[in-house]
Image (cartoon, helix red, strand yellow):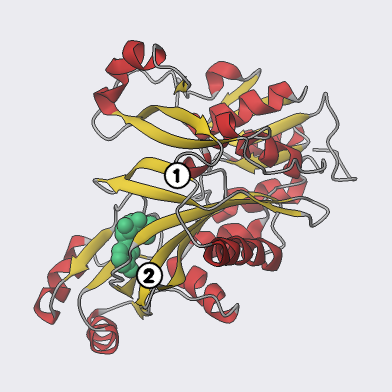
Amino acid sequence: MSNKSGIIAPGGTIGILGGGQLGRMLASAAAELGLHVHIYSPEKDAPAAEVSGHVTCADYEDEAALRRFADSVDVVTYEFENVPAETARILAERGLVRPGPLALATAQDRIVEKNFMKAQGILTAPFADVSDEASLRAAIENIGCPSVLKTRRFGYDGKGQAKILSADGALSAYEEIGRAPAILEGFVSFEREISVVVARGADGEIAPYDPVENIHRNHILHQTLVPAKLPDAVADEARAIASRIVRELDYVGVMGVEMFLLAEGAGAQRLLVNEIAPRVHNSGHWTMDACIISQFEQHIRAICGWPLGRPARHSDAVMTNLIGDDVDQWKVLASERDTSIHLYGKGEARPGRKMGHVTRLYALGTRLA
Ligand code: AMP
């Protein structure tokens, strides 16, 4: 990597760690802006590799391959948050990594993440650190039940989590997550789950998309409803929280901020942050079809030091993930009106595997009418 200005002009090369569908959609957006892409992935047949000019297939621990990769690109970004710290360090030593190490370190560890929110005065579920049986007992006493025990690191789509209904069940939940370093969270009886996908440019400009509502099935995102049905003041607060997080982390790129919406009685509502994803986010896929600038283009603009695009919507939308054999319906879906279909080119439609998504568009302001 040779770029000193932090601005990558058309013709430059973006390195992406990870070769999944997010990398694939980032690579396509980069190509649209006249930029080249180099995918680094340990996985053979990575969905992103198919649409990228340069591919390195190597482990994240392969220092020689990482150095060659770093030297061949102008900026490195990533499509998943569990980039090993040492990998990020090796790459950062040789050039620009965006988003930077602070965001990665914060998002990789649920305790660090929650403490960051607390320091910012941003509300979260009550939480306590669990590192052994004694701290588990103390945490249960402190937080109460029901609660959720989650591994501090490497959890996704509900994996590495166990619900605790009464103190008697605490130990078996701890066993269930493999006695890994953990966080105990009070179980929040939320009304709905929402998220804000927000971008911050290299110059500090911040652009949040509208808050959206997310519906999960079997712990996997099923649908994103755009916009979320929220009073204006709550939508503004959601955008403000997401904006504050990216500003305080000196973040460059797109981030997904997941929140719980709580009913407070008398029609009042409160927002708690559940977690952040330091990358483009599944709940932002609708932006490909309902906005002029998609989250993928916005991320590429940000990490290349370009001006951000306006995050405005021209349509309402519902994004539905195609999980496992849902993808077999591709022909019917492709014949639907005002529906955009995106398939990730993955070979085998295993249960729970994200194979693609569809976005159904509605005239602006009509979905909730
Ligand atoms: P996470 O991996 O933290 O995003 O959790 C996955 C899903 O579990 C969330 O989208 C929620 O539906 C649910 N969940 C996680 N934490 C809590 C909590 N503290 N209270 C209630 N539900 C939760």
Foreground label between 2 and 1: 1
Which residue is the extreme one toward the left?
168
**Could you tell whether 113 is left or right of 174 in the image?**
right
Estimate how packed mark 1 is, as few (under 14), some (14 to 19) or many (20 or more) residues with alpha carbons within 10 Å.
Answer: few
Whether residues under marks 2 and 1 lie with C-beta atoms below 8 angstroms apart, the answer is no
**Could you tell whether 211 is left or right of 90 in the image?**
left
N-terminal-most mark, 2 or 1: 2
Image quarter for ligand 1: bottom left
- Position above or below: 204 against 32: below
**Pick the front one: 68 or 33:** 33
Question: Helix, strand, or loop for circle 1?
Answer: loop
Tell me the distance, in whole angstroms, between the alpha carbons under discs 2 and 1.
23 Å
- Indicate if the residue with disc 2 has its beta carbon within 8 Å of ligand 1: no
**Pick the front one: 1 or 103:** 103
In the rendering, which numbered label is found on residue 262?
2
Estimate how packed mark 2 is, as few (under 14), some (14 to 19) or many (20 or more) residues with alpha carbons within 10 Å.
Answer: some
**Pick the front one: 315 or 129:** 315
The residue drawn where x is 48% and y is 72% is 114
In the rendering, which numbered label is found on residue 369?
1
Question: Do we see residue 19 in this rendering?
Answer: no
The residue drawn where x is 27% and y is 60% is 161
The residue drawn where x is 9% and y is 79% is 168
- The residue type indicated by label 2 comes to Leu
Q: Position of residue 67 (x, y in %)?
A: 69, 38
In the rendering, which numbered label is found on residue 315?
none
- The residue type indicated by label 1 comes to Ala
Q: Quadrant of the N terminus?
A: top right
- Position above or below: 231 against 58: below
- Position above or below: 253 against 167: above
